Amino acid sequence: MIKFCVWFCLMIFAWQQLSAQDGALQQTTERYAADYMSVASRNAALFSGVRQQPVAVPLLNHQYYMDQDYTTGKLSYCGVVYPGVSVRWDLYRDEFVILSPDNYNIALKSENIDFAEIYGHHIFYLQPDGLPGCPSAGNYIHLYSSDEYLLLERLTNIMYRAENVQNNRYQYYFDLSTSFFLRKEGRYYKITNRRTLLKTLKTHRRELRKFINAHDLRYKSDAEKMVLEVVKEHEKLNRS
């Protein structure tokens, strides 16, 4: 009789524990579902994009800006600002991709993006403004602006086929192409190296060469820094 009572009490205790676990699991599931619906409803416009299509060839590297993993950034989409968004910039297709609450990769329409802020850069979708030399529509990094200048950076990943073959299949890789556009005196100038930069700025070439050498600025090793610093220095020289 005593053994039966002990066994019965253990069974009751086990049933209570299982019931408690089921209740906790149900509460956790309901909480996650509520969190998902809350996030999805707040970001409905973002999640209305289409799923990103993977590149259907073997790749040796990735096509994204800085890192293939998502980073936390800020997006302004259709006039609404979304802070703390998981985002990455596909330089091959020139599109921003966000991670939905249910872990889908959603490609956004670039023309609906007012701006994006990732890795300390401000990026916006440029619509041609009709000025001479204006670059084509696309996403550009806003490097610098003043009353005198607007400096933009254009990044593009171009796909090439590698020479080596793996498992009877060719492999492919992305090569990053960088160019800059400087708007001054009512027109745009494309900058692709040190020579075109100095030619575009026209004046103070002697002083700028000294500045470049003194600060060890090299277009091949860090084009963004070199162009930005030289443009700022040219503006200082114009004002002195």
Image: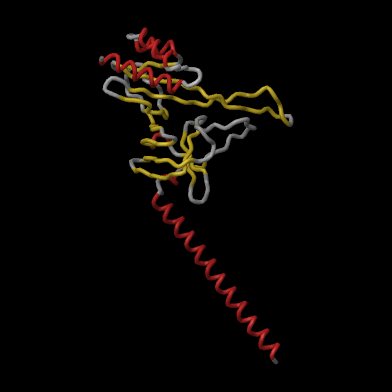
Residue at image point 41% right, 32% down: 121
Name the one closer to the observer, 82 or 169.
82
Residue 122 lies, in percent from the top left, at: 38, 33
Which image quarter: residue 146? top left
Query: Quick check: 148 left or right of 38?
Result: left
Residue at image point 68% right, 22% down: 163
Which residue ends up furthest to the bottom in the rendered image? 1
- Image height check: is 2 above or below 214? below
Query: Quick check: 1 left or right of 21?
Result: right
How many labels sit on residues? 0
- Where the C terminus falls, by quadrant? top left
Name the one closer to the observer, 161 or 237.
237
- Where the N terminus falls, by quadrant? bottom right
Which residue ends up furthest to the right in the rendered image? 167
Which residue ends up furthest to the front in the rendered image? 214
Residue 203 lies, in percent from the top left, at: 32, 9
Which image quarter: residue 201? top left
Residue 83 lies, in percent from the top left, at: 39, 44
Residue 129 lies, in percent from the top left, at: 32, 24
Query: Quick check: 224 left or right of 25?
Result: left
